[in-house]
Image: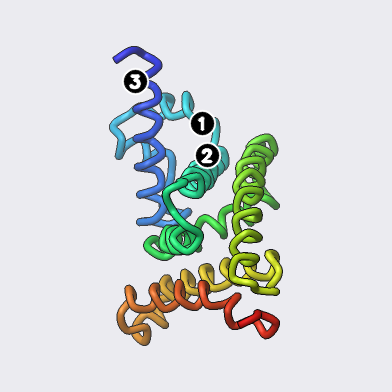
Amino acid sequence: MDRQAQFRAREALVFQVAEQLLLENGEAGMTLDALASELDLAKGTLYKHFQSKDELYMLLLMRNEQMLLVMLQDASKNFAELVAFFMLHHLHHAERTVLFHSIEEKLSMTGTGVHALFSQLYQIRRQRLRIIIQMTEDYLTSIQSKMTVRDYLAGIWALTYGAAVLLNSSFYQRYLGSRDSLKVAYIEQALALPLQHPHTQS
């Protein structure tokens, strides 16, 4: 393995372990010292991959956004399958969904030295949205729904994030019953939204 390949492999491991520590210990417990110790690397080696904890968080957000883009580009999946994959990506790891959303909001207001990374994050997100907007428009037309693309996508995200918050809540978890059944129910509700729209033709 050449040096560049070794660097990429180490970087992938750094991000994987950083996300694991973040999910297990929260922002307060995810220190660069802890990350270096977990990886058995010198702390200085970490700075070859990112310059600060804020930059590390941004790179984790970008990796997650890139995963969603790649998933969306799977031509073998139909619209309903892509909706299910999108929602399950967030609901299987509800704590990540809630935490990443919170971190992005914080960094957008207080992050230092990450302006260029926000531009890259939004560029990936815009690329993803361009694809999904067209797909959603085609789907709504195919089922003769009068629901707008904006309202449908907002509805899918509201259901997904709301379900993630419930699944991540220590209080409500005792009332949820089967987590898998709840996930399926939310996906079914998302797919039913345009069919329930009052102006949808039968």
For disc 2, the neighbor class at 10 Å (few under 14, some 14 to 19, many from 20) is many
Q: Which residue is pictured at 51% across the width and 60% down the height?
A: 79
Q: From this viewpoint, is residue 95 visible?
A: no
Q: How far apart are the alpha carbons under marks 1 and 2? A: 8 Å
SS at circle 2: helix
Q: How far apart are the alpha carbons under marks 3 and 2? A: 19 Å
Q: From this viewpoint, is residue 126 visible?
A: yes
Q: Do the numbered discs 1 and 2 sit on residues whose CB atoms are within 8 Å?
A: yes
Q: Which residue is pictured at 41% across the width and 82% down the height?
A: 172
Earlier in the chain: of badge 3 and badge 2, it is: 3
Query: On the image, numbered disc 1 is attached to which residue?
Result: 50
For disc 3, the neighbor class at 10 Å (few under 14, some 14 to 19, many from 20) is few
* 175 with respect to 28 (left or right): left
Residue type for callout 1: Phe
- Depth check: 28 or 80 in front? 80
Query: On the image, numbered disc 2 is attached to which residue?
Result: 59
Circle number at residue 73: none
Q: Quadrant of residue 176?
A: bottom left
Circle number at residue 6: 3
- Depth check: 33 or 176 in front? 176
Q: Do the numbered discs 1 and 3 sit on residues whose CB atoms are within 8 Å?
A: no
Locate residue 58, reporting x and y percent: 56, 42
Q: Nearer the viewer, mark 1 or mark 2?
A: 2
Q: Which residue is pictured at 41% across the width and 39% down the height?
A: 15
- Depth check: 125 or 141 in front? 141
